[in-house]
Amino acid sequence: MKSFSNPKRRNLYDATLPPDIESNSVVKHEVFFSRPNLVRLNEEQLLYVLLEISPREESEKLPTPPLNICLVLDRSTSMQGDKMDMVKATAIQLLRGLRAEDVLSVVAFSDRAEVIIPASIETDRRKQEGRIQMIQPSGATEIFNGLKAGMQEIRRTLNPSRINHIILLTDGQTYGDEQDCLNLAEEAAAQNIGITGMGIGHEWNDIFLDALASKTGGSSAYISKPKDIQRFLVDKFNALASTYADDVILDFKPQEHVKVNYAFRLHTRRRKRSVETPMRLGPILRDMPLHVLIEFVVSPEALVDDVFILLEGSLKLSIAARSTPIPPIRIKLDREVRVNPSAEPPPTRILSALSRLTLYRMQDRARSAADDGQYDTAVRHLHNLATHLLSQGEHSLAKTALFEADNLERMHSWSASGNKDIKYSTRALLLSGVKEKGK
């Protein structure tokens, strides 16, 4: 960590950094700290920072960027029936809703991939609808084949002025090609191509889809019933169409004696036990700020000077609707260091975020304990989760948590959809909290 006791040296150093986020004309921000100051103690201290980034009012003057979307659809045998019928009907609905400048390609895969609709602006919509209707389920699930074909289609019309995104829809697990998929996702991230993973039912691997999507700053979604496929796909298309900044990257140098323990993007979820830099934060929507909750662990050795810098770096934004690149935006998070703690309470926003995040982490601990065979511990975490959910009025989800606790206690296993129901429902509470703040 650089420490400048000499003000002139500090000013010279500051002059080499990008402009502050406050002076930027592209985005505005607010920062909320869980405590007003750090205290000189002989032990580690936790500090939470809620970073909220949103477009400035000038963003309304920018045109909505055109889309370059590829639907990568699982058509394995297990997709037959209502799932495939709803997928095809929704794909046709999305096709009919495209603007003239939008591009939608469709890939269907099982143990091999087929391009159903190639990426092109010049299109025959009736012919395309017919090709979608002809998709028939067969074969096994090999996601890499579908992703690879989807990437090829996205690249055909890849353009920084577009929102370039792959939506992967599957109901099963892929076997043996997970690392190839993750490597492909890293290639996508390097080309500013986003990935969203949607799982139908309970047999797909949510850990894998989370890892895959998060490589690009994206997320996974859980579709419990076939009838919900339409809502999830349409909502995702609407979100992509309302994108302001399609990629936000936080680049920073690790500071001595401080550890960035977690980073949660509250409107989906991003978590790394060992946070790396640069950190992909995902998109900023026109109607919903980007919220990131960061957990810092500060060592006693850090608290020598009167002010300690927790994080110093820059935000890098990609805005498809702007013809010129956005210069990096400087960001610096610091706190005063005092002998005594402040009596000032934490801001309501950060308390609310931490409260909802606690629910998510409780189910995460329960799942980890069950995976390790520590069923008594998992049951205890689920009972604690149910108690907190009841206190927040979430009676239905509390009932689900208690039901799964009973399953783990009696049979040492979750119900068919239990762990996904709880995981994605507590994740949805994070989203609902953000939406309430944004009203």
Image: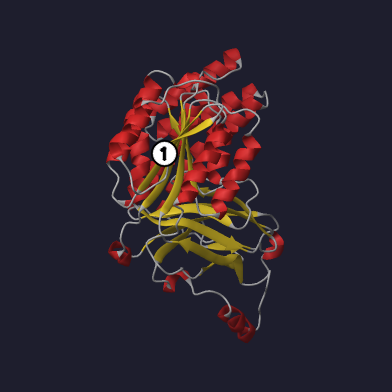
Pick the front one: 343 or 169: 169
Color style of the picture: secondary structure
Nearest the viewer among 129 and 162 is 129
- Horizontally, residue 287 falls left or right of residue 363, namely left
The quadrant where residue 38 appears: bottom right
SS of the residue at dot 1?
A: helix
Residue 223: give x, y in percent of width and height. Answer: 42, 29
Q: Where is the N terminus found, in terms of image quarters?
A: bottom right
How packed is label 1: few (under 14 Cα within 10 Å), some, or many (20 or more)? some
From the viewer's perspective, tell me whether residue 278 is left or right of residue 158.
Answer: right
- Towards the viewer: 29 or 377: 29
**Is residue 132 shown above or below 153?**
above
Residue occupying image coordinates x 34% and y 55%: 286
Residue 259 visible in the displayed image: yes
Question: Residue at (28%, 49%) from the top-left corner?
Answer: 99
Q: Position of residue 306 (x, y in %)?
A: 61, 72
Of 28 and 34, nearer the camera is 28
Residue at the extreme bottom: 8
**Residue 5, percent from left and from top:** 66, 80
Q: Is residue 17 above or below residue 298?
A: below
Residue 345 in sight here:
no
Measured from the top left, where is residue 34 in percent x and y? Answer: 50, 55
Relative height, residue 389 to residue 261 (above, below) = above
Among the 4 quarters of the image, the one containing residue 69: top left
Q: Amino acid at mark 1?
A: Leu
Quickly name the residue at label 1. 429
Q: Is residue 140 left or right of residue 117?
A: right
Q: Residue at x 31, y 63 (%)?
A: 62
